[in-house]
Image (cartoon, rainbow, N blue to C red):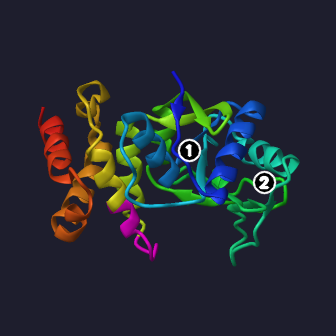
């Protein structure tokens, strides 16, 4: 069954259509993360996301496919995307085409060789924590955007929760509170078949860190409808 995404603005729609086209060209070796991952889970579970976002984040499995960055960015270039500048240390993580924006990431802690891999335009890209488990827990889902049907790779709900908890550990991110809000939204979607209790020791460290952060941010909990019940469901699952 296809997951129908809600009506969206032009920039978000263009990013989604682009990632569906990219899946047709390169169907393995990556998954979506970030805000659009949350939007997709909300669409499947019949609820509305709290936080609007237009850009789409994709993380690449450079452990399983060492040339994934080159392959993925080549596909983006062939679709008309280009890197939007370069950071001081040579990262070209943001790719744009008209209003569409796709941020390309790789897992953290894979070593210097993986981190030094370059894309089609000669740049490296950003590393992000919690990404390898998200890749491991990903599968294809069918998505409908307007009159376009396609496929995208997406983490399980547990994978999404851990990815958001891990992203919140990046202390240099000036806008990391968005991860708290996204995490709270995801907790409201937990169902028994998500098997959140299957979290391993590393997952639980990330989740515990996020729960500690949320404990100090009552305002965030009140911002998200159902967050109290969602957090209770998560804690119950982790105590199982």
Percent of width and height locating residue 239: 12, 37
Front-lying residue, 89 or 233 = 233
Q: Is residue 50 above or below residue 133?
A: below
SS category of the residue bearing label 1: strand
Placement of 150 over or under 173, stated as above or below: above
Q: CA distance from mark 2 to mark 1?
A: 18 Å
> In the visual, does 9 lie left or right of 36?
right
Q: Residue 46 at what x, y percent from top left?
A: 37, 37
Which residue has dot 1 on it? Answer: 32
Quadrant of residue 137 within the rendered picture: top left
Q: Is residue 177 magenta?
A: yes
Residue at image coords 76%, 55%: 118
Q: Is residue 58 left or right of residue 87?
A: left
Q: Is residue 72 magenta?
A: no
The local secondary structure at tag 2 comes to loop
Q: Quadrant of residue 179?
A: bottom left
Residue located 75% across and 44% down the image: 72
Q: Position of residue 113 (x, y in %)?
A: 67, 52
Of marks 2 and 1, the one in the foreground: 1
Q: Is residue 202 above or below residue 148?
A: below
Looking at the figure, which quarter contains the C terminus? top left
Q: In the rendered structure, are the residues bearing label 2 and label 1 in contact, judged by CB atoms less than 8 Å apart?
A: no
Q: Residue at x 70, y 34 (%)?
A: 23
Residue 162: image location, x then y, percent: 36, 46
Name the residue carrying label 2.
Answer: 119
Q: Tell me if mark 2 has few (under 14), some (14-19) or many (20+) residues whose alpha carbon lies within 10 angstroms of its own.
A: many
| Main SS class of the magenta portion in the image | loop
Residue occupying the point 42% across, 61% down:
51
Magenta span: 171-180
In this view, the residue in front, 188 or 196, is 188
Q: Residues within 10 Å of mark 1 (few under 14, many from 20)?
A: many
Tell me the number on the disc at residue 48.
Answer: none
């Amino acid at each position: 069954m296809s997951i129908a995404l809600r009506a969206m603005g032009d920039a978000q729609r263009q990013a989604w259509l682009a990632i569906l086209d990219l899946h047709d060209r390169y169907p393995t070796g990556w998954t979506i993360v970030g805000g659009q991952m949350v939007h997709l889970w909300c669409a499947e579970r019949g609820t509305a996301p709290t936080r609007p976002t237009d850009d789409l984040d994709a993380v690449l499995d450079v452990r399983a496919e060492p040339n994934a960055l080159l392959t993925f960015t080549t596909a983006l270039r062939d679709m008309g995307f280009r890197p939007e500048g370069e950071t001081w240390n040579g990262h070209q993580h943001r790719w744009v085409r008209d209003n569409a924006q796709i941020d390309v990431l790789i897992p953290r802690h894979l070593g210097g060789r993986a981190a030094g891999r370059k894309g089609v335009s000669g740049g490296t890209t950003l590393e992000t924590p919690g990404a390898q488990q998200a890749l491991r827990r990903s599968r294809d889902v069918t998505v409908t955007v307007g009159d376009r049907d396609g496929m995208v790779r997406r983490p399980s709900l547990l994978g999404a929760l851990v990815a958001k908890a891990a992203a919140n550990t990046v202390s240099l991110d000036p806008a990391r509170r968005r991860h708290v809000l996204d995490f709270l939204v995801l907790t409201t979607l937990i169902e028994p078949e998500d098997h959140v209790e299957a979290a391993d020791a590393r997952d639980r460290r990330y989740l515990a860190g996020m729960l500690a952060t949320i404990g100090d941010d009552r305002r965030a909990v009140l911002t998200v409808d159902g967050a109290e019940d969602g957090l209770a469901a998560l804690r119950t699952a982790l105590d199982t």
